[in-house]
Amino acid sequence: MGFAKLSTRRIASAAGVPLSQIHYHFGSKQNLVFEVLEEENRKLLGRQSSMYQSDMPVWKQWEQACDFLEDDLDSGYVRVLQEMVAAGWSDAEIAAAVRQAVMAWFELLTWVAERAEEKLGNLGPFTPGEIGALAGLPFLGAETLILLGVEESDLPSRSALRKIAALIRTLEEEVER
């Protein structure tokens, strides 16, 4: 349901605990969401990190990341994250928490690019940090448009993300020759 529609009363009811317990343990809806977002982000980063540490070619990893995006959209994680991004535009405390969560993804993608640089020898004109940015930003943009209800027929964000795997595959196969 997302951050905006979430209520501590509804959470307490679903958890079968008194509302006072929610406020005692978390202090506010915002703090509860921070903790949930932090924990979920940690788990998802672990999932991605394990995948990136595998011997799977990078293009296959990209395809898997696209599959993970679908899972994360279905779970509600992306909706809460994107709503927190928007809330962070006018609240410095929220911005700091969300920035920390999002930057952890870019740090992971930069690490993946560093590994690719070790294997390939160079990344052309790009630094690993720039490759990390270029890898993560399309996912953030696609998430935003998907949550806004932009249909794939109007703007093919999902298929465009998946086709990047084909581009990476071509580059990897070229290096192997």
Image (tube, helix red, strand yellow):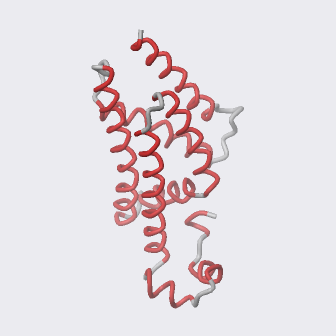
Q: Nearer the viewer, residue 128 or 148?
A: 128
Query: Residue visible at 48% across and 49% down?
Result: 47
Quarter of the figure that contains the N terminus: bottom right
Residue 103 as seen in the image, left or right of residue 142: left
Query: Residue visible at 50% across and 56% down?
Result: 81
Quarter of the figure that contains the C terminus: top left
Residue 46 as seen in the image, left or right of residue 126: right
Image: 109 above or below 127:
below
* Residue furthest out toward the top: 177
Q: Nearer the viewer, residue 167 or 60?
A: 60
Query: Residue visible at 52% across and 91% down?
Result: 20
Task: Provide residue 164's location: percent of width, then percent of height.
Answer: 52, 26
Image: 123 above or below 141:
above
* Residue furthest out toward the front: 55
Residue 53 as seen in the image, left or right of residue 82: left
* Residue 17 picture quarter: bottom right
Task: Provide residue 96's location: percent of width, then percent of height.
Answer: 34, 60
